[in-house]
Image (cartoon, rainbow, N blue to C red):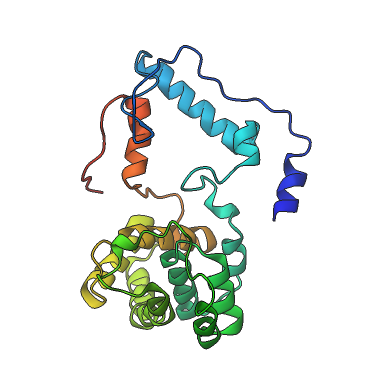
Amino acid sequence: MQNTLAQFIENVEYRNITYKGTSPVLLKDGKPTESWMKDWPLEKRLDKFFEFCQEFDLRRDQLLAEDYQIFSHRLHWHEHPFCDIMKKVTDPKLRLWYTLTFSFSNEHWGTLTRLMYQGPENLREHFKENRHARNDLFQIYYPKNTLVKDWLIDGPKQAAEDMWEFLEKHRHRLERPFTMMEYAKLLEKYFKEKQNFRSPLYPCKNTARYMAMAYPDIVDPETVLFGGTGHFDGMAQIFGVNLNGKVQY
């Protein structure tokens, strides 16, 4: 993948985004306390946001081209190799099992591939000496005292067995694909009620994203999926007001 990326950016003529005329702001815990663009009119802020989107699409900004995972969430979810391999998984139960495992391990590639190609018991042995999740795993959404490496063996599999048929039937009753938020909220409800999770929406939304990118006939990738706190912190840079808080979709 890195070789492919290097070939992709080799002949790029960089067009770096600049922010001339922004104001210095105080930082708290390394984060800005207000928008750097606080003295700009809203129209100018929106123009800068869409300039960012364009440069990200074209990979012409050097930072975005060479360190494309600098953001907590990639903007091009369909580019993730997970979507490529998941398109080949036609069994709906396996598809859900693998996607949940990937999402609840905070997208740990080694955990996913070992589960898919060597099975859960091999994965259990692997966890004795190796990491089971990415370092930035948000354990806050797991039930208290959960040993995550053990849960990853059985929890996603149980969820897939419990939910795959319900999700299939529910989609057919809708006579359309799920929206990403519908799919994520159904999974969230299950994990809260059946597996005693506290706040599992974060990995459930990741599951919905990946399912949408790999199977748009099941989950519609064009629908809205609200981000978490970081999403609203980022929007504050544009709109200049604190948008963080509880938002109903």
Measuring 33% from the left and 47% from the top, which residue is drawn there? Answer: 228
Camera-side residue: 185 or 63? 63
Residue 6 visible in the current orientation:
yes
- Count numbered badges in the picture: 0
Q: Does 87 appear above or below 49? A: below
Residue 200 visible in the current orientation:
no
Residue 219: x and y in percent read 43, 61
Residue 140: x and y in percent read 29, 60
Camera-side residue: 39 or 30? 30
Q: Quadrant of residue 87?
A: bottom right
Residue at the extreme front of the image, as rendered: 129
Measuring 54% from the left and 62% from the top, which residue is drawn there? Answer: 214
Camera-side residue: 80 or 166? 80
Q: In the shown orientation, is residue 120 left or right of residue 158?
A: right
Residue 225: x and y in percent read 37, 50
Q: In the shown orientation, is residue 33 left or right of residue 206?
A: left
Measuring 36% from the left and 73% from the top, which residue is drawn there? Answer: 167
Q: In the shown orientation, is residue 98 left or right of residue 3?
A: left
Q: Does 49 appear above or below 22? A: below
Query: In the picture, which quadrant includes the N terminus?
Result: bottom right
